[in-house]
Image: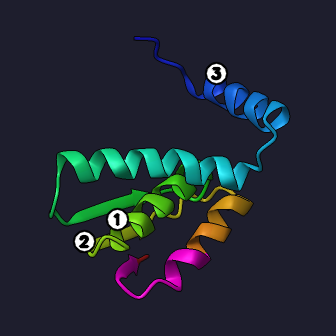
Amino acid sequence: MLLLDASQIRKWDQYTIQHEPVRSIDLMERAATACANWILKHFPGHSFDIFCGTGNNGGDGLVIARLLAQQNLIIRAFVINTGTKKSGDFLTNLDRLRRFPRSALLN
């Protein structure tokens, strides 16, 4: 198994965005969907607390929270203010999660 560090993952994301083409928000949705599907398969019916920073990884976490909530699971998403700039994709997914009625977003 090949493990990538953060810099390598950013490069692969950028490569995919440039060559597929796919917007970064759509790539985030695709990755989070795969993760949420894995979670649903291995932990059906569980509740989850999801802790998110304010960058793109936090955006991934917010998508996962929304997707799991859409499956009627009890989800609590926590946004941890790390003092860093909020990414655009994070803000988009924060808004999407806030509009979803079955999730609890806690700051």
Contact (Cβ within 8 Å) of mark 3 with mark 2: no
Q: Which mark is residue 45?
A: none
The residue that disc 3 covers is 8
* Residue 41 spot, x, y in % from top left: 23, 48
**Residue 68 on image: x %, y %:** 34, 65
Q: Give the answer, above or below, for where 76 lies relative to 18.
A: below
Q: Residues within 10 Å of mark 1 (few under 14, many from 20)?
A: many
Which three-letter amino acid code belongs to the residue tagged 2?
Leu
Q: Residue at x 68, y 26 (%)?
A: 12
Question: Looking at this view, is 29 or 56 the one in front?
Answer: 29
Q: Is residue 44 above or below residue 73?
A: above
Residue 11: x %, y % from top left: 72, 26
Q: Residue at x 47, y 83 (%)?
A: 100
Picture layout, residue 97 above or below residue 60 = below
Q: Nearer the viewer, mark 3 or mark 2?
A: 2
Give the residue displayed 27% in from the left and 76% down from the top.
72
Of the residues shown, which amino acid type is indicated by label 1? Leu
In the image: residue 1, left or right of residue 39: right
Q: Which residue is mark 1?
A: 68
Label 1 or label 3, whichever comes before in sequence order: 3
Nearest to N terminus: mark 2 or mark 1: 1
Q: Relative to residue 100, is residue 45 drawn left or right?
A: left
Front-most of residues 24 and 10: 24
Residue 52, image x, y percentages? 46, 58
Q: What residue range appears in magenta?
A: 95-105
| Marker disc for residue 73 | 2
